[in-house]
């Protein structure tokens, strides 16, 4: 695959690519190879798997070699392809923002249920206000808006998405446009909550929660992502605490904040809520692996 080859076969390319990626330390060498070959050839993974005898032309081979070399250096597949699937949607991704993780879909699902429940208790002319803090690629508000659109509830929901990074907001805007949701989600450059954010019914946030001392020990792929989107300070909760302190000025009585946390931070985030928001309730939802994943912080009605 390193020489001047006019074309090669899918099966041969995959075999060699899997070996190279395994040697480079990829956790999922077969999946990575299949996704990158599909990206280079424009073929669906099912076609690649079903037809190992299919020829790959010279142009696609060059693209595959380049993508494979990038992955060997540790660059995430999502950045190489420029896309990532999240909650059934395809999103543009690049180094301007964190790559959306599957576990964050739990936050979207619970947010949808809370919006629908709240709308059910309001008069028909009333709306629910939602803000997603630190939106990055816009994955959370876009997935939520798409779900609400499918249920006919989007017109009664006002969604604001904020980020301190103007570059990340440009990426979020592109993703909103991709899914026809530019008019459904308002973007604002702000450090957490802007002054005009409140009052809101629901605050969503997947903020950085990795302790600073653990960043350099993460898989090499994480080194390609913005450090500011990962680094949560000495114990991982510095940014989350800053947001908690802002909630009394923004969240309505009876409102809820959904905060993604690390799997070992259940006790610490509970203590942070108790200290900063006395009288408020905090419970933690677990992900599909049974690990603590989502802090549900509720203001008394």
Image (cartoon, helix red, strand yellow):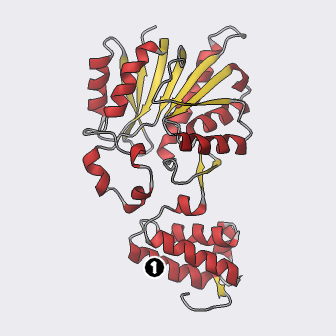
Compared across the picture, whether 10 is left or right of 240 comes to: right
Residue at image coords 53%, 13%: 199
Total number of numbered labels?
1
Compared across the picture, whether 273 is left or right of 9 comes to: left
Tell me where residue 138 appears, x and y as whole percent: 58, 40
Q: Is residue 87 visible?
A: no
Tell me where residue 260 appears, x and y as whole percent: 42, 36
Residue at image coords 59%, 66%: 35
Q: Is residue 18 visible?
A: yes
Tell me where residue 136 appears, x and y as whole percent: 52, 41
Residue position marked by numbered label 1 in the rendering: 20
Residue at image coords 36%, 59%: 219
Q: Vertical placement of 146 versus 10: above or below?
A: above
Q: Vertical placement of 177 versus 152: above or below?
A: below
User: How many C-alpha atoms fall within 10 Å of the one at disc 1: few (<14), some, or many (≥20)?
Assistant: some
Name the one closer to the observer, 204 or 52: 204
Name the one closer to the observer, 272 or 182: 182
Q: Is disc 1 placed on a helix, strand or loop?
A: helix
Q: Vertical placement of 7 versus 85: above or below?
A: below
Instruction: Determine the image quadrant of residue 153.
Output: top right
Tell me where residue 71 appears, x and y as whole percent: 48, 69
Quarter placement of the N terminus = bottom right
Residue at image coords 65%, 85%: 9
């Amino acid at each position: 695959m390193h020489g001047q080859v006019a074309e090669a076969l899918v099966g041969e390319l995959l075999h060699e690519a899997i070996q190279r990626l395994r040697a480079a330390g990829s956790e999922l060498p077969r999946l990575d190879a299949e996704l990158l070959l599909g990206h280079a050839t424009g073929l669906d993974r099912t076609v690649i798997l079903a037809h190992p005898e299919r020829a790959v032309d010279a142009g696609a081979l060059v693209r595959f070699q380049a993508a494979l070399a990038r992955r060997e250096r540790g660059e995430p597949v999502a950045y190489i392809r420029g896309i990532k699937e999240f909650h059934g949607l395809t999103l543009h991704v690049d180094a301007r923002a964190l790559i959306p993780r599957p576990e964050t879909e739990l936050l979207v699902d619970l947010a949808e249920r809370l919006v629908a429940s709240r709308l059910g208790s309001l008069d028909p002319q009333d709306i629910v206000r939602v803000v997603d803090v630190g939106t990055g690629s816009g994955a959370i508000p876009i997935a939520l808006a798409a779900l609400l659109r499918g249920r006919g509830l989007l017109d009664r929901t006002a969604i604001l998405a904020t980020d301190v990074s103007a570059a990340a907001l440009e990426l979020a805007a592109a993703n909103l446009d991709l899914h026809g949701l530019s008019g459904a989600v308002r973007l604002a450059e702000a450090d957490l909550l802007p002054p005009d954010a409140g009052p809101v019914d629901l605050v969503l946030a997947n903020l950085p929660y990795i302790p600073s001392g653990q960043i350099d020990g993460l898989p090499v792929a994480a080194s390609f992502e913005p450090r500011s989107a990962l680094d949560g300070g000495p114990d991982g909760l510095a940014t989350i605490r800053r947001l908690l302190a802002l909630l009394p000025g923004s969240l309505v009585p009876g409102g809820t904040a959904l905060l993604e946390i690390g799997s070992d931070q259940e006790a610490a985030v509970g203590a942070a809520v108790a200290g900063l928001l006395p009288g408020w309730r905090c419970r933690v939802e677990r992900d599909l692996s049974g690990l603590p994943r989502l802090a549900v912080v509720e203001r008394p009605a």
